[in-house]
Amino acid sequence: MTRFSQMRPAQQAGILCNDPQFQQFAAIRSGVPGTQFCASAAAQYLREACNIASRRELNSDTSAQTKFAALRTTFDAWAGRIAAPNN
């Protein structure tokens, strides 16, 4: 089985959008706290956050990859999976 960190970014994004915790995070970041997005709404949030039309673009667009990595870091800190970065 392939580890999450070894998957291509588009595959990581697909898994992330199906994560209920990410769906809640996406709703909060979209200005609707107290709700939880469905997977397709979370995917739309991710596409907008990474400025892409399709998650497949994450595999080839380095700018989108950078934005996705930052989004994952922010989410992981929000979820308590990592320490919050000091900015």
Image (tube, helix red, strand yellow):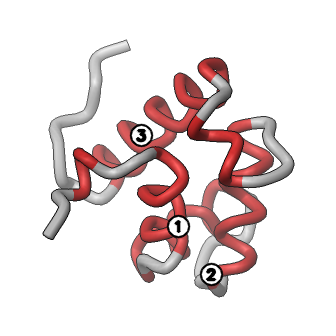
State the residue at coordinates (53%, 67%).
14
Task: Answer above or below: position of 34 versus 80.
Answer: below
How packed is label 1: few (under 14 Cα within 10 Å), some, or many (20 or more)? Answer: some
Q: Nearer the viewer, mark 1 or mark 2?
A: 1
* Residue 3 in the figure: left or right of residue 34: left
Q: Nearer the viewer, mark 3 or mark 2?
A: 2
Q: CA distance from mark 3 to mark 2?
A: 19 Å
Mark 2 — residue?
39
SS at circle 1: helix
Question: Which amino acid does the dot numbered 1 rest on?
Answer: Gly
Name the image quarter holding the C terminus. Answer: top left
Mark positioned earlier in the residue sequence (3 or 2): 2
Q: CA distance from mark 1 to mark 2?
A: 9 Å
* Residue 14 in the figure: left or right of residue 82: right
Residue 20: horizontal and vertical position, in percent? 44, 82
State the residue at coordinates (69%, 38%).
50
Q: CA distance from mark 1 to mark 3?
A: 17 Å
Mark 3 — residue?
74
SS at circle 2: helix
How packed is label 3: few (under 14 Cα within 10 Å), some, or many (20 or more)? Answer: some
Mark 1 — residue?
14
Residue 81: horizontal and vertical position, in percent? 18, 53
Residue 72: horizontal and vertical position, in percent? 41, 44
Q: Nearer the viewer, mark 1 or mark 3?
A: 1
SS at circle 3: helix
Camera-nearest residue between 73 and 51:
51
Residue 31: horizontal and vertical position, in percent? 74, 60
Give the quadrant of residue 44.
bottom right
Name the image quarter holding the N terminus. Answer: bottom left
Question: Which amino acid does the dot numbered 2 rest on?
Answer: Ala
